[in-house]
Image (cartoon, helix red, strand yellow):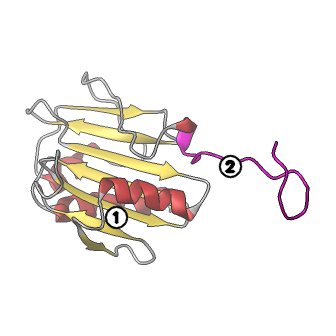
């Protein structure tokens, strides 16, 4: 350990961001597309109705402290991904939101009350064809990625996830 130049005492080591299970801020769920594994905080029928597509497969990624939920319809790519991230600091939660919804490319997102982040319709963020709604409060971030063009669909699912988890 290095010594602090001011006091001569040992300084605490600089820590890398501490996210769920050591996953980086930009970690996406890794879920096989086979069958339906229920999301512990979202009803599959609610997802189908809110995102406007039939759910043909669903699964969870338990590497995240709150399992990430992934849903498919007929296209090859997921129709919806819901990622809840817990970090050590509000700054780390903000890093997750900034990765998902870069401030220079998105509009402000301020729902539910007390949460803030960004939203964008499909095709706005390079490399993504669908919409995003990403918000943070304290050291928690919630990111919803959908293959739909409208960010309001992602917002509804983010708000329901936050409410159901009591965040």
Q: Main secondary structure of the magenta part?
A: loop
Callout 1: 10 Å neighbours few (<14), some, many (20+)?
A: many
Q: Is residue 112 magenta?
A: no
Q: Is residue 164 above or below residue 47?
A: below
Is 20 placed left or right of 160 in the picture? right
Quarter holding residue 94 = bottom left
Residue 49 shows which numbered tag? none
Is 18 placed left or right of 164 in the picture? right
Q: Which residue occupies the foreground of this view, 82 or 96?
A: 96
Q: Is residue 32 above or below residue 12?
A: above
Mark 1 or mark 2: name the one nearer the start of the chain: 2
Count of numbered badges drawn on the protein: 2
The magenta span reads 1-20
Choose mark 1 or mark 2, whichever is in front. Answer: 2
Q: Secondary structure at mark 1?
A: helix
Distance from disc 1 to disc 2, alpha carbons, whole Å, reads 34 Å
Residue that mark 1 sits on = 159
- Image quarter of the N terminus: top right
Residue 92: percent from left, percent from top:
52, 56
Q: Residue 39: tell me if it is visible.
A: no
Point 12% across, 61% down: residue: 150
Q: Secondary structure at mark 2?
A: loop
Residue 14 shows which numbered tag? 2
Residue 126: percent from left, percent from top:
16, 50
Residue 147: percent from left, percent from top:
14, 47
Point 42% across, 54% down: residue: 96
Q: Is residue 5 magenta?
A: yes
């Amino acid at each position: 350990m290095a010594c602090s130049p001011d006091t001569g005492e040992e300084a605490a080591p600089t820590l890398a961001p501490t996210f769920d299970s050591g996953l980086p801020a930009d970690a996406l769920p890794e879920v096989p597309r086979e069958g339906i594994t229920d999301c512990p905080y979202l009803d599959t029928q609610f997802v189908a109705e809110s995102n406007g597509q039939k759910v043909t497969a669903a699964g969870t990624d338990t590497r995240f402290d709150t399992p990430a939920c992934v849903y498919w319809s007929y296209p090859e790519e997921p129709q919806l991904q819901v990622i809840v991230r817990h970090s050590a600091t509000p700054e780390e939660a903000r890093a997750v939101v900034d990765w998902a919804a870069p401030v220079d490319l998105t509009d402000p997102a301020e729902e539910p009350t007390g949460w803030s982040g960004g939203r964008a319709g499909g095709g706005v963020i390079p490399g993504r064809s669908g919409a995003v709604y990403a918000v943070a409060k304290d050291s928690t971030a919630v990111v919803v990625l959908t293959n739909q063009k409208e960010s309001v669909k992602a917002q509804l699912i983010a708000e329901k996830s936050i409410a159901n988890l009591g965040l």
